[in-house]
Image: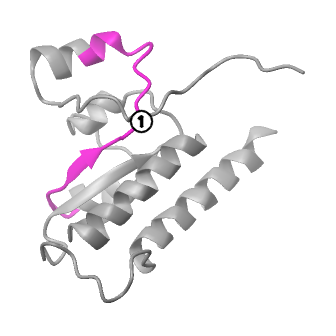
Amino acid sequence: APWAAEERADVTAAADLREIVKRRRCLPEARQPLYRFQNERVWLLEANDWSSNQLTATIAAILLSEHAGYGVDINYMPSGSGIYSRISKETIQGAAATERSSHGRLFGYANLEVWPSGQRDQYLELVTTQGRVTDMGYVGYDGRSGWFVS
């Protein structure tokens, strides 16, 4: 299928992103984290298949691991569909989430850029009614979908 090569590229990009977060540092070596959790407190940050989401997840991973001292891993999901059930851990999907949950390890789960369109029912149930997911507000930049033609 024509999409198979693209899917492999996405998986490779996701593996690269996980590797970058795990093995590289961005802040100066002399700078120590505010807290030392020895990877006991871990955040899984979801990265989807669009660039702004991956950038936001990467920046958050750097700040959480190098500045705040949390353990961080990237959970790549090709789509934001079903995000609220993943954040609530009602559904476990993706390599990083499956690895941690199969060993009984606790973790926080976040996606820093969620497009809620088409997921209103899930939002209302898990955020508004049950309170199992916290909406932390806007990411702080404006996205624009549409056609741009010259």
Would residue 95 be visible to someone looking at this image?
no
Q: Looking at the image, can residue 11 be seen? A: yes
Q: Which residue is mark 1?
A: 113
Image coords of residue 129 (percent x, y): 11, 14
Q: Measured from the top left, where is residue 45 in percent x and y?
A: 35, 51
Residue at 44% from the left image edge and 24% from the top image edge: 115
Q: Secondary structure at mark 1?
A: loop
In which quadrant of the rendered image does the C terminus lie? top right
Q: Residue at x 41, y 35 (%)?
A: 113
Q: Position of residue 100 (x, y in %)?
A: 25, 60
Instruction: Identify the image quadrant of residue 74.
Output: bottom left
Work out which residue is located at the far left of the displayed protein and give it.
Answer: 130
Work out whether residue 42 or residue 103 is closer to the camera in this orientation and state it.
42
Q: Vertical placement of 103 versus 91: above or below?
A: below
Q: Amino acid at mark 1?
A: Glu
Task: Give me the residue at 45% from left, 48% from top.
Answer: 56
